[in-house]
């Protein structure tokens, strides 16, 4: 099946910059989004912790790069993952994304975070954030958007996370999300560890 998010002549995401070289797009995207990451918290601070907030974060960060920023993806996704031996996470199907996100967000907002200790908070938060990430609402930019949402949620709910630690460990965080989203074979301890460290340092 043809991926409508890619240019017809090269396997590169269509973008507002007209870049058709994958490496150049990656660098340009990183430079542009870095500016918006710096104040995304202020831009979305008045919103509830729901799907519209998640979409707004993505739109704010990636809006100058992709026309579809802030929009739920319309195609199925498969990504071979090194930490899964080349297998892919079973991401939500497009028609299920809103439902799957709503289920996770209901649990996230319904948890009495103030009653939990640091380790229990990290364990509970890990499972919910991994489930939100597994829904994979966007064609690109899911990890950055979900982790931004997570740090915003944590700060408002009394367990601020060290964002610098998460940023500096971006590759580890993504691999940990993958390991925590592998169905019956999920391994949560890697994400729990960095979330707990981030909470203690926060």
Image (cartoon, rainbow, N blue to C red):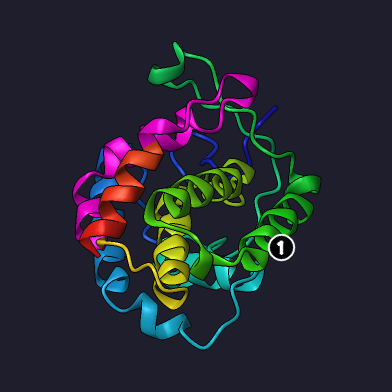
Secondary structure under tag 1 reads helix
Residue at the far top in the pictured view: 85
Name the residue at 46% across, 27% down.
179
The stretch in magenta equals: 163-190
Tell which of 151 and 1 is nearer to you: 151
Tell me if 129 is positioned left or right of 15 in this view. right
Give yes or no for residue 187 being in the magenta stretch. Answer: yes
Question: Quadrant location of residue 94?
Answer: top right
Tell which of 189 and 83 is nearer to you: 189
Identify the residue under disc 1: 106
- Residue 162 seen in render: yes
Mark 1: few, some, or many residues within 10 Å (few <14, many ≥20)? few
Name the residue at 55% across, 22% down.
88
For the N terminus, the quadrant is top right
> Is the magenta region chiefly helix, strand or loop?
helix
Counting from the top left corner in percent of width and height, residue 2 is at 66, 31
Counting from the top left corner in percent of width and height, residue 80 is at 48, 20
Counting from the top left corner in percent of width and height, residue 175 is at 37, 32
Tell which of 65 and 16 is nearer to you: 65
């Amino acid at each position: 099946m043809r991926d409508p998010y890619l240019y017809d002549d090269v396997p590169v995401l269509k973008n507002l910059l007209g870049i058709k070289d994958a490496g150049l797009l990656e660098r340009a995207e990183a430079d542009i989004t870095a500016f918006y990451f710096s104040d995304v918290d202020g831009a979305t601070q008045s919103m509830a912790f729901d799907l519209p907030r998640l979409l707004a974060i993505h739109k704010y960060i990636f809006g100058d790069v992709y026309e579809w920023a802030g929009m739920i993806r319309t195609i199925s996704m498969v990504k071979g993952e090194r930490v899964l031996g080349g297998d892919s996470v079973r991401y939500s199907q497009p028609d299920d994304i809103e439902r799957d996100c709503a289920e996770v967000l209901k649990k996230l907002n319904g948890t009495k975070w103030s009653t939990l200790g640091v380790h229990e908070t990290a364990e509970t938060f890990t499972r919910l954030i991994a489930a939100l990430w597994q829904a994979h609402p966007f064609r690109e930019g899911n990890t950055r958007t979900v982790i931004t949402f997570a740090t915003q949620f944590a700060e408002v709910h009394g367990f601020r996370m060290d964002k610098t630690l998460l940023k500096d460990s971006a590759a580890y965080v993504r691999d940990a999300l993958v390991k925590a989203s592998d169905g019956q074979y999920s391994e949560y301890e890697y994400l729990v560890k960095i979330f707990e460290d981030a909470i203690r340092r926060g």
